[in-house]
Amino acid sequence: MDPMQQYLEEFATQIARPEEEPANQDLSRWHSCFGYSPSEALVVIGRLRADINGRMLSDDQWNLIRAGREAEGYDRETYEHQLQLWSTDSHSHHLGTSVELNDTSSYIFTLGGPFTDIEGLRRTTVRKRVVEDWLGTQSPSNYRPTFIRLSRAPKNLSENSSYPTLGIDSTLPQHRMQGVNQSFAPAQKEIPVWYFFYGTLMDPQTLQKCISIPHPPILTPASIEGGTLRTWGRKYKALVDGPATAHVDGYAYRVLLSEHEEYLRFRETEAYEVVRCRITLHSEEGVQEEVLGLTFRFARHDELDVVQPRS
C-alpha cells in the first residue's frame, strides 16, 4: 500500500471514532511528563486531536518503541507531543548534539530536506551518526531531522569466551577459549536458537503478537539455573544472576527467524540484555533435555525494586 494512502486510512479510522474525555490518570500523566495542570492538559489534548498533522508516529513505529516509552511514563499521545516539542526546539537539533562516538543504536526519523526522494520512502531506520556526518558535508540547510531512538536489548555474544552467560563471571580465564577447536554456543548470529521466557512472553498470544506470526506458538515447559527473579517498576519481572543452585521455571521457544529475534529484542528494550544460558526442557512424559540457548537478563541493577525483609 502507498504510504500516503495508508496514512490517510489510519487517520480516517481515528476521526471516525469519537474521542473520549481524558481520564484522570491520563491528566496525571500529562502533569508528570510536562508539568501541565488539568486545564492546560485538556487544551493541549484538544489541539493534538484536532490537528490532522499531529501524528508523528505510524502504528508500526509506535509498536517498536512502545515498551520503552511506557516504562518512562509516556503513552503514545504524550510521546508524540514530546516529539513535537523536541522538533520545535532549535537548540536540540544542531549537528553534533548528543552524538556519542560509540553510539551504535538504531533510530527512526521523518524523511525531509535532502532525503525526500529515496525510492519513495517517507520513513526509515538508520544509524544516526551516519546521517549526521553526511548532512555535515552538504550545503547549509535548515533541515534538521528529529531522531527517535529505538531501544533494543543488546546482544554481544563472544566468540572467544562464554561471555555473557547467566549466573557466572564469564570474564574469568576458565571461561575463555582453551584451544583452537573450541567454540561457544549459541553463536552471535545462530538461527534457529532456543530462548527461555519467564515473564509475559510465556503467554502464547502475547508472543504471537510480538513476533507477528499467524498462529499461537508452541511453548515448551522449561527451567534454568544460575538466575533469580526480581522486579523493577513494581510490575516488570527482572532476571538477574544468582547462585548456581538458583532455579527459575518458565517456558522455552525455538526462534526460527532473525527477524523474530529482533522483534523480541525491541520488545524487551535496552533495560535487558541477551545472555547465554542452559535450558532444561521438560516433556509431558517427564523426560528432560538440556539445550544451549539464550534469555533476557536485566541490565539496570540500580533500578531493581528493593527486596522487603520478611517479618
Image (cartoon, grey):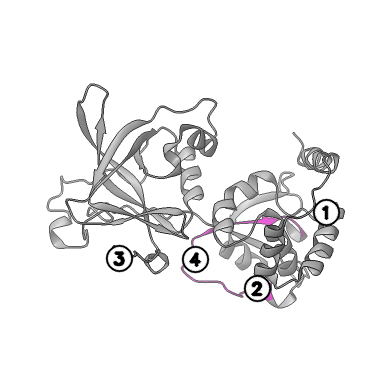
- Report the amino acid beneath label 3: Pro
Is residue 91 rendered to the left or right of residue 207? right
The answer, for residue 137, to whether it is visible in the render is no
Choose mark 2 or mark 1, whichever is in front. Answer: 1
Distance of label 3 from label 1 (alpha carbons): 47 Å
| Residue 231 vertical position relative to residue 254 in the rendered view, above or below | below
Distance of label 1 from label 4 (alpha carbons): 35 Å
Residue at 54 percent across and 56 percent down: it is 68
In the rendered structure, which segment of residues is drawn in magenta? 92-112
- Report the amino acid beneath label 1: Arg
Q: Which residue is mark 4?
A: 103
Query: Which part of the image, by quadrant, shows the C terminus?
Result: bottom left
Looking at the image, tell me whether mark 1 or mark 4 is earlier in sequence order: 1
- Report the amino acid beneath label 4: Asp
Q: Which residue is mark 3?
A: 309
Query: Which part of the image, by quadrant, shows the N terminus?
Result: top right
Residue 95 badge: 2
Q: Which residue is mark 1?
A: 49
The answer, for residue 288, to whether it is visible in the render is yes
Looking at the image, tell me whether mark 3 or mark 2 is earlier in sequence order: 2
Looking at the image, tell me whether mark 2 or mark 1 is earlier in sequence order: 1
Looking at the image, tell me whether mark 4 or mark 3 is earlier in sequence order: 4
Task: Name the main secondary structure of what is drawn in magenta.
Answer: loop
